[in-house]
Amino acid sequence: MSRPDPWRWQVALRAITAIAGGYALTALASATLAVLALALGMARVDAALAGMLASFACYGAIIVWSFGAATLARLWGSLAAATALLWVVRAVVTALA
């Protein structure tokens, strides 16, 4: 019985992180951008559209970066840091608006 190749687990974990983590971070980034655009005086429909359009670029960049990060720990740490930063920005902008 052979053991699974560790390289395959690395690729599988990166793919799962890119898909699920990228989606979650992209949704948060899209909402944060929409809230920020609303706070800056943009119309509601334009703010939602801007957030949605930016999400396509954000998700693509996260997927590419998921396979370019040196280690899985760095990838997960960076995604967690970006999520925390976006969460704080969104909370501050919501509180100030």
Image (spheres, rainbow, N blue to C red):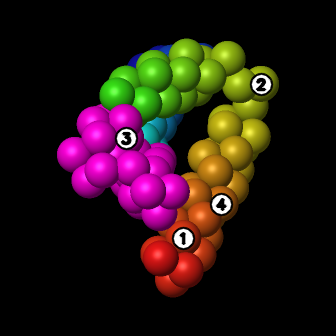
Residue at image x 54%, y 22%? 61
Asked if the residues shown at circle 4 and circle 3 are in contact, with their CB atoms under 8 angstroms apart, the answer is no
Using the image as rendered, state which of residue 32 and residue 85 is in the foreground: 32
Q: Identity of the amino acid at label 1?
A: Val
Task: Give the CA separation, mark 4 to mark 3.
Answer: 17 Å
Q: Residues within 10 Å of mark 4 (few under 14, many from 20)?
A: few
In the picture, the disc for residue 93 is 1
Identify the element where label 1 is drawn: helix
Residue at image x 62%, y 22%? 65
Identify the element where label 4 is drawn: helix
Asked if the residues shown at circle 2 and circle 3 are in contact, with their CB atoms under 8 angstroms apart, the answer is no
Task: Give the CA separation, mark 2 to mark 3.
Answer: 29 Å
Mark 2 or mark 4: whose residue is earlier in sequence: 2
Using the image as rendered, state which of residue 23 and residue 41 is in the foreground: 41
Asked if the residues shown at circle 4 and circle 1 are in contact, with their CB atoms under 8 angstroms apart, the answer is no
In the picture, the disc for residue 85 is 4
In the picture, the disc for residue 51 is 3
Location of the N terminus by quadrant is: top left
Query: Would residue 85 appear left or right of 44 to someone viewing this image?
Result: right
Residue wearing tag 2:
70
Q: Identity of the amino acid at label 3?
A: Gly
Span highlighted in magenta in the image: 28-52
